[in-house]
Image: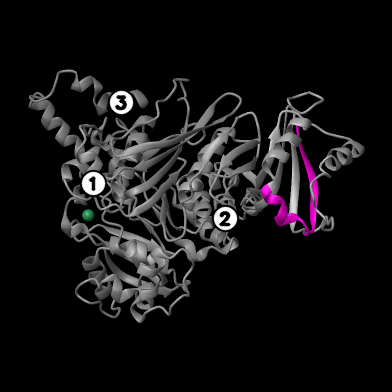
Amino acid sequence: MKILTLNFLTCARKACKAEPAAFPLHPRDAELEIVEAELNTEFLRNVLPRVEWEALRVVTEELGLPSLPNVAPEPDAIFPAASTAAAATANETPANPAPTQLLQDLHHLLLETTILSGKLVCGNCGHEYAVKEGIANFLLPSHLV
Amino acid sequence: MPEYLMRLVQVHESFRKAELQALAELAGVDMEFVSYSEDSPFCIISLASPAAARALITRSILSQAIYELWGHGSSLPALHASVLATSPPHWPSCATTSFRFTLDSYRGSRSTASQTTLIESFSYLPFTGPIQMRNPTHSFRIFEDYALGEKEPRYLYLGRFIADSGRQAKTTYDLKKRSYISTTSMDAELALVTANLSLAGPGKLFYDPFMGTGGFPVAAAHFGAVTLGSDIDGRSIRGKEDGKNVLGNFKQYNLTDHYLDSFVSDLTNSPVRGCLGPSPLSAGNAPGGWLDGIICDPPYGVREGLKVLGIKEGRGEWRKEMHLDRWQDEGYIPPKRPYSFEAMLDDIMHFAAVTLVEGGRLGMWMPSANDQDIELDVPTHPFLEVVSVCVQPFNKWSRKLLTYRRLPSNSILTSTTPWIKRREDPGLVHANDLNSFRKKYFEGFREKEPEAMSSGPLAEDAAST
Ligand SMILES: [Zn+2]
């Protein structure tokens, strides 16, 4: 499971849905793997505003990955200038400016860093969801449904 | 605006217009239908330029190619008159270049001699360049539309070729050549059309909550979206030996960069952030949508049976205890209970309303009737506007592809549409949550109408069991 996906998931129990402690899920005994992927600037530009930054920071720290700034960086700091405002107005494809280091770092963290196996633990109810072969299982046992 | 001839395919007729409209929106081009009939593979549209025509057709699955319209008429003389009246402005661009003429007779045929005669009847066009059958600069095509069983065409067109469609993807993604499929996999053609209607594209995030072997995520990924999927059955995601699994399909098509993740979950107890969401109305602020599209073919119950997590009512305490003992075992399979089709549709609609970004799309397949042959309504939701309803008929049943657009929240907040969810949550009748029902029951439903009990979730679920 990619770190980006983890940012979109919470405890599956209805009783936990409204509880702030149920998000993010906390990785435990996580075995990480790097799966290389091509940088997708357009996707990151679209999806980064939807990321809960504080939750991402918590997870990054818990996984022992290089820590993130306290506050989400501004788009201008992430995306090379030529490809933001100019690209939106010009009809032609602009020459691809070199991606910023921040963009490459976020790409690496969100889309290349994968939890291959381990557990995802709810901070509210303590329920553990298993991750195996990169696939997390959120099915609840009947007494928790 | 100039007119263009679209050579459509004569299958899935009710999807064709919806696909072109979606592609026009996606490409940001103005398109008007000048003439269109479900009974014909020829359609005239107006567009600003050949560039707009190319942008429109490049992803189309239900068309073959687009042509600049040089003339049309209900007989050959009428076609010639139309060509002479409208095409001269285009002539200089073809005066000395290589060219060819070919013929496309729909539901009709001509002898070789008759074909030659027909093509030669256009020799008044002042082209002095060489005739070249392979890769000419300009390719002209005469189209004939015959009524079934007729000897003479009912309509003719002449067009100059502009661009081919994206229909070769139907072959590329053909299930017969896909390494991992199941009996319920949607055929590649309709999966691609579904992705088109929901505007899957570069930069977007798409999700299929009933992914099965991943046919919809693959289709959305083909068009450039990054995709996420889940299924209640982990075995369908993990697949079999030899890499025959969902990820294996993405590898087969060289689309792994567009594969975000798969996970095992149930829509009624989904881990997706915000999916139970407070009703967007009561929240009073942005609902935090984060998906650009949701495309799915929910299990109908026709072939699969409809189940969600939980133990069927009345199965006894021992069964619950057994699951309580075993749920942490390796390979534990949670019990499932029946789930009514209508309840599932409501859940999907609510899920889409709270997880889609404004303008995001939901593409959902459903059967036209239930197993008692009762016609099912197109589900509605105050936050979702119907964009298109396309029907695929079979011999004894039919199914529909419903495509919705997530409306902007502010357009709803100011409207008078009440937020009504027909069923709060089908899970309410089950397990621990039953306590709240019992509590209300003993309090005598003070605030509710007496009929609340018979039309409530309990009655629904009992009926479906
Ligand atoms: Zn929890």
The chain letter for the residue carrying disc 1 is B
Question: Is the CB–ligand 1 distance for label 1 below 8 Å?
Answer: no
Say which mark, if any, is on residue B460: 3
**Same chain for the residues at labels 2 and 1, yes or no?**
yes
Question: Is the CB–ligand 1 distance for label 2 below 8 Å?
Answer: no
Mark 3 neighbour density, 10 Å: few (under 14) some (14–19) many (20 or more): some
Q: Amino acid at mark 2?
A: Ala
> Quadrant for ligand 1?
bottom left
Helix, strand or loop at disc 2? helix
- Lateral position of residue A121 relative to residue A31, left or right: left
- The C terminus of chain A is located in which quarter? top left
Closer mark to the observer between disc 3 and disc 2: 2
Q: Nearer the viewer, residue B301 or B424?
A: B424
**Residue sitting at x 29%, y 30%:** B314
Helix, strand or loop at disc 1? loop
Tell me where residue B37 appears, x and y as whole percent: 60, 30
- Lateral position of residue B295 relative to residue B70, left or right: left
Tell me where residue B209 appears, x and y as whole percent: 40, 47
Residue contact at pointers 3 and 2, CB within 8 angstroms: no
Tell me where residue B254 appears, x and y as whole percent: 57, 64
Mark 2 sits on what residue? B51
Its colouring scheme is one colour
Q: Give the magenta part as a residue range.
A: B89-107
Mark 1 sits on what residue? B277
**Same chain for the residues at labels 3 and 1, yes or no?**
yes
The chain letter for the residue carrying disc 2 is B
Q: Nearer the viewer, residue B291 or B245?
A: B291
- The N terminus of chain A is located in which quarter? bottom left
Residue B90 magenta-drawn? yes
Closer mark to the observer between disc 2 and disc 1: 2
**Residue sitting at x 31%, y 28%:** B461
